[in-house]
Each structure stands twice: as structure tokens, then as C-alpha cells.
Amino acid sequence: MLSSGRRFDRTTALFLSLLAASFIFATFDVRAQGEGAGGIMRDGAQQLFAPAQKAAEFAVAPVVGFVDGISNIAGLRAENERLQAEVNSLEQQLRETAALERRVAELEAISGLEAPEELAAVTARIFSAGPGTFDQIRYIDKGKADGVLVGNAVIDEHGLVGRVDRVTENNARVRLITDPLVAVGVRVESTNETGVVTGRGGGALRLEMFQATQPVREGDVVVTDGSRFPPGIVVGFISETADVVVGFALRTAVEPAVPLSEVDFVKVVVGWSPLDAGIEEPGGLIEPPPFVDPTTERR
């Protein structure tokens, strides 16, 4: 009995000792705020797995960065396309505004333009060019109903544009002064001597003076002499100085005063009867396309 009681006492004492030690250990660990055995184990685990975590971050970081980069590039491209579209729209608006301002300014200039010799004139708009790129003809939206006749001079605020060569009731065809079929009797203002200007199909005109006695200088003003066109209309400016050669015609070039490629509005001088007004080219006029106002189309 004695040995059995001793074993029980030792077992009980050992149990109570372990229980007390556990209580003390737990209390010490809590009071140490994680610096006890639990903390040591956590620190050890962290040190054990830290290299693996760093390796994983090193491997994953470029992939994450690449994906983020692609997202950023896509966003920047979309933003760039949106901004480019806005720029294109603004540039188009500026071009339309500039064109409208130019047309308004030209119309105002034409409206204030007085025909030579205070002759009657009607304002017309060019609405079509010839069928070919190099054709030197234009169609205007005024015709017989407005008093326009074959042979009438066509002018703008700069000078002579051309002459009417065919007419319908409501439209007319204008042959530009750059057309080889158009001959203009002219006078050089600086010398008061006369000659004939003819077109070359575009660019500078050709001036021939068969009875010239004085040279002409670059920049001299050339005006109509009153034969086929009303007198005093500016035709252009001498672009090449030329001297008189005895027994030969004086020939040189004349730059047209009118920027023909930019003309929108003109005036037709209807109060003048040129010598060849009654001569009409054979074949009659094929009716050009109807006039359509672009501003109406945009609405």
C-alpha cells in the first residue's frame, strides 16, 4: 500500500508541476508580448519562408508590371485617339471658318465694286468649272434673264477675269483670260502704248506690241484699251522687262492681276457692247449642272 501511495503522490506531484509550469509559461509568454516561445517559433517560420517569398515577389513583379503597362498603354492610346479626333475637328472648323470669311470678304468687295465708266453690272457666283482639270472656263449663276450677253466682260475686285462666251436663260459660261482663245486689247499705263494679250492655258499671259516705241518694265500695269472690253480694267502686270527691237514686235509676259483659282464671286458688265458681242460660237450651250448652294446642303 505504501509503494502504491508513493507512486500516486509522485504522479500527482508531476502532473501538478507540469500544470503549474504550463500556467507560468503561458503567463510569461503573454506578458512578454510575443517574445516568448510562440514568438520565437513565428520568427523562425518567417525567416524560413522569407527567401521563398522574395523569390516569388521577384518572379511575379515583372508580370504584374507588364500587365499594368499594357493597361496603361491601351488607355493612353485611346486618349491619344480621342485628342487627335478633337484636333482634327477643330482644324476642320478653322478651315471652314477661314473659307467662309474669305468668301464673305470677297462678296463684300464685289458688292462695293463699281463697274468701269459707271456701267451697269450684275453680281454672279461661279458654281462650276470646266469638265477638265486644265479647262480655262467657269460657269456662273446668271444668264439672259439677268441681262447677261455673249461678249460681256467679267471682273472682280482685282481686275479682268474673262469674257462671257455662251449664255442660257439662267446661267452663262465664262472663258478666262488665260484661255488661248481669249485675246484682250491692252494698254501699258507707263507708256500709253497698246498691244494684245493672249492666254497660254494657265500661268502668265503673252503680250505682243507691234508698234511699240518704248520699252516696258517689270511691274508696269496693263489695262484694257476699250476695244473688246470696257477701258481701264486692270489685266495684269509686266513680269519680264523687254526692250524695243526695230522691225520686230515687242513680246513679253504679263502676270494676271486676278488669282483666278480663288475666284468665287464676279461681276458681269452688262452695260457695254463690245465689237464682237453679236458673234456667238456655233454649237450652242449645253446646260451646266444646276446651281446648289453648299451652305444649304450642309443644313
Image (cartoon, rainbow, N blue to C red):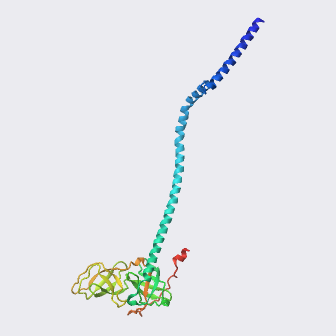
Q: x, y percentage for residue 138?
A: 44, 82
Q: Quadrant of the C terminus?
A: bottom right
Q: Can I make out residue 123 in this image? A: yes
Q: Position of residue 133 (x, y in %)?
A: 43, 76
Quarter of the image for residue 149 reads bottom left
Q: Position of residue 239 (x, y in %)?
A: 30, 78
Question: Where is residue 297, by image quadrant?
Answer: bottom right
Which one is nearer the viewer's eye here, 229 or 122? 122
Horizontally, residue 207 falls left or right of residue 110, namely left
Of the pair 193 and 26, the residue shown nearer to us: 26
Residue 49 locus on image (x, y percent): 57, 31
Residue projecting furthest to the right: 1
In the shown orientation, is residue 126 left or right of residue 206? right
Does the image show residue 264? no
Task: Determine the residue positioned at 52% across, 48% down.
Answer: 69
Quadrant of the drawing holding the N terminus: top right
Q: Farthest top residue?
A: 2
Residue at x-position 68% and y-position 15%: 17
Q: What residue lies at 60% left-to-right and 28% top-to-bottom?
A: 42
Residue at (49%, 68%) from the top-left corner? 93
Task: Decide which of 163, 89 is in the foreground and name it.
Answer: 89
- Number of labels in the image equals 0
Q: Is residue 219 left or right of residue 19?
A: left
Query: In the displayed image of the protein, which residue is found farthest to the front?
Result: 31
Horizontal arrangement in the rendering, residue 191 relative to residue 61 (left or right): left
